[in-house]
Amino acid sequence: MNHLKLGAAELDRMPAIPDAQMSPEQKKVMDEIAAGPRGRIGGPFIPLMRSPELMNRIQKVGEYLRFHNTVGLRNSEFAVLIVARHWSQPIEWAIHRTIAEKEGVLPATCDAIAEGRRPDNMTEDETLIYNVLEELRNNRSLSDTTYGQLHKRFGEQGVIDLVAHYGYYSLLAMTMNVARTAVPQNTAPVSGLKAIPG
């Protein structure tokens, strides 16, 4: 199923809630988030706002993973691209591809991931992260060899942080896919990201 573009027959199921229609809990959470490093939120947090306490707890996990993780910004953004590809999630892809490229991930690497291909010329860290997340998706776990490589490079906290990246960004992707969250009009075009059959 391809939810990369919303057509007339596929409208956003959970659009933004106007400020005047927000509950006191929703307003409180929105104000708290707007005061943090994210500023005003959009994307997955629009549908998640239907459960404000859950959204607040989830966004705190995301704040850690995005701004304070132990694998580094370039590596974490590369990881998000793999997750966005696994879920064919255009908003997640558009937001994080821009950041990943600013952090030094090659456009050709991004293009290959978008097309569902294993990228050529990945860095050692990118190769490791790619292998880890592909194995995690396919096998629902990691072999001793892969775990050992990940542990040697990033330590136990890095292992947990990278696994949490996969879980957190998968949750956001699933939420947006179910809600059919519209790609913001000011978002860069999502080129090459097509749903992978099966």
Image (cartoon, rainbow, N blue to C red):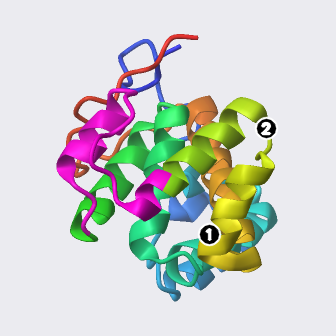
Q: Tell whether position 86 is magenta.
A: no
Q: Nearer the viewer, residue 45 or 98?
A: 98
Q: For the residue labelled by badge 1, is the local secondary structure a helix, a strand or a loop? A: helix
Q: Quadrant of the C terminus?
A: top right
Q: Residues within 10 Å of mark 2 (few under 14, many from 20)?
A: few
Kind of element beneath mark 2: loop
The answer to whether 39 is drawn above or below residue 35 in the figure is above
Across and down, in percent, residue 107 comes to: 19, 49
Q: Which residue is mark 2?
A: 140
Give the camera-side residue of 176 and 7: 176
Residue 29 is situated, as x and y percent measured from the top left of the image, at: 67, 75
Query: Does any portion of residue 29 appear in the rendered image?
Result: no
Asked if the magenta segment contains residue 119, the reply would be yes
The label number, if any, that marks residue 62 in the structure image: 1
Q: Position of residue 79 (x, y in %)?
A: 50, 55
Q: Is residue 62 visible?
A: yes
Eye-nearest disc, 2 or 1: 2
Query: How packed is label 1: few (under 14 Cα within 10 Å), some, or many (20 or more)?
Result: some
Asked if 95 appears above or below 119 in the picture, the reply is: below
Q: Please provide the residue range marked out in magenta.
A: 104-127
- Three-letter amino acid code at the position of disc 1: Gly
Residue drawn at (32%, 48%) of the image: 94
Q: What's the residue type where badge 2 is placed?
A: Arg
> In the shown orientation, is residue 25 left or right of residue 31?
right
Q: Which one is earlier in the sequence, the residue at label 2 or at label 1?
A: 1
Q: CA distance from mark 2 to mark 1?
A: 22 Å
Q: Is residue 127 left or right of residue 27?
A: left
* Above or below: residue 115 compared with residue 132: above
Residue 114 image offset from top left, x and y in percent:
34, 34
Question: What residue is at 35 percent from the left and 60 percent from the top?
Answer: 123
